[in-house]
Amino acid sequence: MQYLLNGLPIGAIYALVALSYSLIYTASGVLNWSQGDMVMLGAYLGFAFFHFLHFGFTLALLGAMLLVGAIGILVQLCILRPLRKRQAPPINVVIATLGVAIVTRNLALAIWGPEAQIFPSPVSSAPLAIGALSVTRQDLLIVAVAILLMIVLHYLLRKTRKGKALRAVAQDRYAAVLMGVDTEKSDALAFAASAALGAAAGILVAPVFFVTFNMGAGIGLKGFVAAVIGGLGNIPAAIAGGFFLGIVESVAGGQISSGYRDAITFALLILVLWLRPSGLFLRKVRQRV
Amino acid sequence: MQTHIMAISGICKSFGGLQALDDVCLDVMANTVHGIIGPNGAGKTTLFNVITGLVPPEKGKITVRGVPLPFARPAQLAPLGVARTFQNIRLFKSLSALDNVLIGQHVHTPTPILSIIVNGGAARRGEKAAVEESLAALRFVGLEDKAGELVRNLAYGQQRLVEFARALAAKPAILLLDEPAAGMNPTEKSHLVQLIRAVQERRQTVVLIEHDMKLVMNLCSTITVLDHGKKIAEGTPDHVRHHPEVISAYLGRSGSHAGSTGN
Amino acid sequence: MAIENTGKKLVLLLAVAVPLLLPLLVSNNYYLHVINLAGIYTLIAIGLNLLSGYTGQVSMGQAGFFALGTYVAGLLAINLGIPFWAASLAAIAACALCGAAIAIPAMRLSGPYLVLATVGFGEIIRLILLNWTPVTRGAAGLTAIPLPKFFGWQCSSEAQFYYLIFSFVLLGTYVAYRLAHSKVGRTFAAIREDELAAEAMGVRVNRYKSAAFVLSAIYAGMAGALYGAFSGVASPDNFTFDDSVAFLCMSVIGGSRTIVGALIGSFMLTGMSEALRALQTYRLILYGGILIFTVIYMPQGLAGLAATVRARLRRTAGRSAAASTGGEGKA
């Protein structure tokens, strides 16, 4: 049971990243391999805001989200839009996002150096006791903020015009174009939102992990796995997948072995892909002829 | 003496709540041009999809020359002598016209792996024969000079012809054509009619979905009319043209005046 | 027409002669080492081109097969003293089996699902190699992998390895070229373009996809066996996801839809990697930038660029010839 609780905060992080993948994938069919590096950027920028500009935690969070969101828009405009215009095959788009990942990662290395930065937590990391289990305030913060962001996103997607436009594009791009939706804007928005969410995940996880230029790679991959396990085309499924993965990892790592923990994650992935590729938390998707 | 070449009986298929095909029965006679018409959404393409194994029906049976067709196994249609074209052209876009037609012959050409690797005689002979067949098919539709051209660089009408040639290259007993004239201008259409007649003369059977009434009435010896998944009429063009249910299905416009409504 | 033929023959002659004489021209061992490495990677890239470029099944897990090849051949040589040629065959067989096993679930997947499955495969192999210490020696990896020996001829110098690797590259290129320019290659391409239509033509798509997987695994496995003998050491660190990414980049930048693209891509990327080593971090930033640029502006890779240039030259030549004879211009 303790493992379950331990799995929640990392599950929340995975959920945020998985959500970001799903958001971009449903909106524009793009698989964004640089998602993990947005997380990394969020952590570094948050750290910079916090340390050098002496922002409070909330301000640093918002600042990082805005800045990384802007970077996301830049990537969309300079890279993804030309690719779409030239009807590039999907593999080329994947490679382009890979290129973004490589560039971002090494820029971070060049700017901040190879040593891990330590991001102080805004709340104490002393464990709280809840009955027989223990959590830290840090864990609670991560889960709380993550859930808050998801609720905000949900509201934005359902109630605002831009959000509805995004959902329209996700359902039927061509029809949305015919209805006058500016798909380029909505693509950029989707990308910016994903980047911002990734940045938030980065700041949230920074006090717990080490902040290094490489941290995006692992988190990005796990987040993607979570999105696929949950169900790629669907945001609530991605969130469920994220929490599910976090808990499974925690339990497996605790009960079985921490060395093989990642192997178990991938074995789970392969199992899901084999038996239920549309995702665990998604109704089966039928292919249209 | 007219023989059956394809017998379709009792085909039912629904998608979600929509009954796309409801107990459809059809007999196609050999060496004829058999038309299938009906308003949009009648289930014509779905019927083709069921025949060619892309969509499994819930009920029913189809036999070709007495042999029952397997459902949901599209790759087994070609060896049984059934070839098709698609409503929205499905060519292999970045390949040349010749390559497209060559693939049409897939089941009739051998794949001698070892000979291919060492560039042996068997492989070269096989390839040469296949290329000659394919060029002949392209010649038949009048596009031999475009053999080396990438199909995505060809005009729309030419692409339709390449798809036609590709289906022909498989030397099928039955050719299923899904709206082959869609998007063609009158010259191209009359060319198409000539080609279909020539195919019929070569003792092959053609089943045709079309919206262009003039073309259908002109070419087909038998016409089946579908509406909302059900067969509402069947017979000669004259019979169908004057059939009251057919007329009302097309909203009161008589068959001979309905122009091509396109897609 | 006659000019084209002799031109082609000349190019072919050079293509074989230059590599044959290369070690005599390049005496610098370091350069030869880099060339040898590039040659090994070329094999992986060829297999990847057949799988991803021709058949359209994107794999980001080739490092897994590469690792399997190295470890199977290496362990057999170290533990049982099995000679290189037999160990390589075993490595190839292991990879072929693995490829076939992977193909069964992978065939049903496409797009991001397939990519992820291959990534998962690569990672699982790496983790097994890392954690199954009693067999694979864990993080320490393999050391002292014996040098290849053929009928008493010991292969130890860079130049000798060059000829060994070159022979395999030649063989691999030839076989791949023959396959690609035959019904097999055509069918692969058809599957890439439109699986549904291919099936309608009677193509047994699943069989061909599996074949492509197995082929790519065999190529990577052979490369692995060569790599083990060549470098003498190997550890799970050499076979990470980043390496799979590098192989994919070689395939795409060189031109994934051709066989020669594999050669171009692997030599370009390996050479660039070494040449820019001095720039350190900036090297990778440049690398990423080149990747993005290539994929946007040269989607068919360098090989594709060459083909486009050639086609354009031919068209202008045709146009000027037609103009002078009064024939019809290009539509």
Image: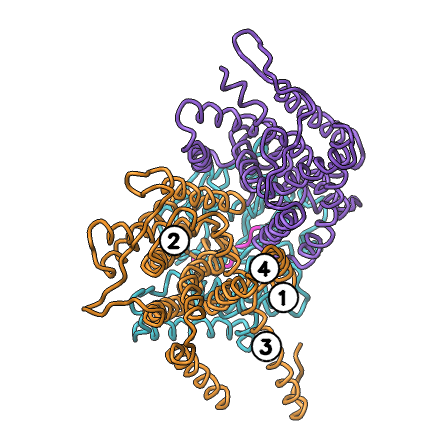
Tag 3: amino acid: Ala
Tell me, yes or no, whether the two marked residues, 2 and 4, touch with CB atoms within 8 Å.
no
Q: CA distance from mark 2 to mark 4?
A: 49 Å
How many neighbours does mark 2 have within 10 angstroms: few (below 14), some (14-19), or many (20 or more)?
many
Left or right placement of residue C240 versus residue A157 in this view: left
Q: Chain of mark 2?
A: C
Tag 2: amino acid: Phe
Residue at x 40% of width, y 46% of height: C236
Q: Which chain is cyan?
A: B
Tell me, yes or no, whether the two marked residues, 3 and 1, touch with CB atoms within 8 Å.
no
Image spot of residue C281 (x, y percent):
60, 54
Badge 2 and badge 4 both on one subunit = no
Q: Which numbered dot is residue C66?
A: 2
State which tag comes first along the sequence, 1 or 4: 1
State which tag comes first along the sequence, 2 or 3: 2
Dot 2 lies on which element?
Answer: helix
Q: From the viewer's side, name the closer residue of A168 and B227.
A: A168
Q: Which residue is mark 3?
A: C311
Evaluate whether residue A10 shows in this view.
Answer: yes
Colour in which chain C is drawn: orange
Tag 1: amino acid: Gly
Residue range of the region highlighted in magenta in the rendering: B30-36
